[in-house]
Image (cartoon, helix red, strand yellow):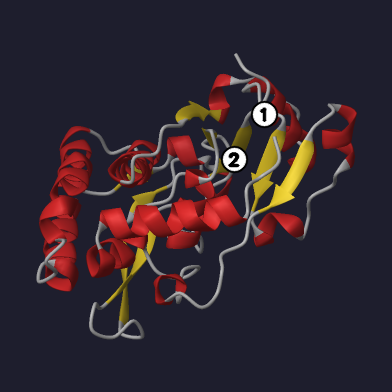
Amino acid sequence: MSGQRVCAIHQPNFFPRLSTLAKLFASDVWVVLDDVQFARRDYQHRCRLAALADVDHQQWLTLPVHLPYGRATTIRDVRVIDPGRNRRRVARLLQHYYGRSPHWPALQEPLRKVLEVLDSTDRLADISEVSTRALLDLLGWPGSLRRSSQFSVRHEKSERLADLTCAVGATTYLHGTGGAKYLNPWPFTAHGLRTELFTTPEGHPMWRAARRITAMRALTAMGPIAVADELQRHLSLNPPRR
């Protein structure tokens, strides 16, 4: 396993925001953070849809969930309530918001994968992970995926992230602006690792509301090829150190 790799460590998000998808696209390895506490106000079980004609016209698409262990429930233990009913609602709402786009046919394969997993499991982590991986595949992401629950690591936030970065053979941990607020660099320095901040650019209309709304909006407004080209352009101008 090469040591010159960039990893991003992020919870599985349901049809993730463009800012999250872009960070994962910029990495070589996505460590799916599935063994941390579920947060109802986060994006693990929901996404914010925005209309093609008006990005400010928004609506939550939420998967109702059951927490078997109450507030202490980890993401991998969360269960979706009535997946079959939610399958129909997901298909209906996405069709309503994005079905008129000329790029809608290109989104049928990712959507099919998500609807299939809703048919086969009630595990939120699996459903959200598939929704993210399907969009990364659509963009031609060549990276790999590992799950944090596969590894034995320390529990303090920064120590956990540093240990996971080491475990997947990466040299750089790519984090967003949220992580910058609490990240302690010392556990990374002790391992000989780098930390690097990933930010989304301004100016291009694709990035408007990129930290709030699902990437499905950009993919249907511009098409997967144009989105992938813009992600590659941003990455070429801001390559993470390896």
- The answer to whether 156 is drawn above or below residue 102 in the figure is above
**Quadrant of residue 56 within the rendered picture:** bottom left
Residue 239 in picture, x, y percent from top left: 62, 48
Residue sitting at 76 percent across and 44 percent down?
195
In this rendering, would 181 be left or right of 3? Answer: right
Residue sitting at 40 percent across and 71 percent down?
206
In this rendering, would 133 be left or right of 190? Answer: left
- Labelled disc at residue 9: 2
Residue 14 in picture, x, y percent from top left: 37, 52
Q: Nearer the viewer, residue 25 or 44?
A: 25
Q: Nearer the viewer, residue 229 or 136?
A: 229
Residue 60 is at least partly visible in this image: yes
- Helix, strand or loop at label 2? It is strand
Q: Badge 1 is on which residue?
A: 164
Q: Quadrant of the C terminus?
A: top right
- The answer to whether 154 is drawn above or below residue 23 in the figure is above
- Helix, strand or loop at label 1? It is helix
**Badges 1 and 2: C-beta atoms under 8 Å apart?**
yes
For label 1, count other residues whose C-alpha is less than 10 Å away and answer few (under 14), some (14-19) or many (20+).
many
In this rendering, would 26 be left or right of 111? Answer: right
Residue sitting at 50 percent across and 45 percent down?
24
- The answer to whether 18 is drawn above or below residue 186 in the figure is below
Amino acid type for the residue under numbered disc 2: Ile
Q: Nearer the viewer, residue 77 or 31?
A: 31
- Labelled disc at residue 53: none
Amino acid type for the residue under numbered disc 1: Leu
Q: Nearer the viewer, residue 206 or 210?
A: 206
Residue 91 in picture, x, y percent from top left: 13, 57
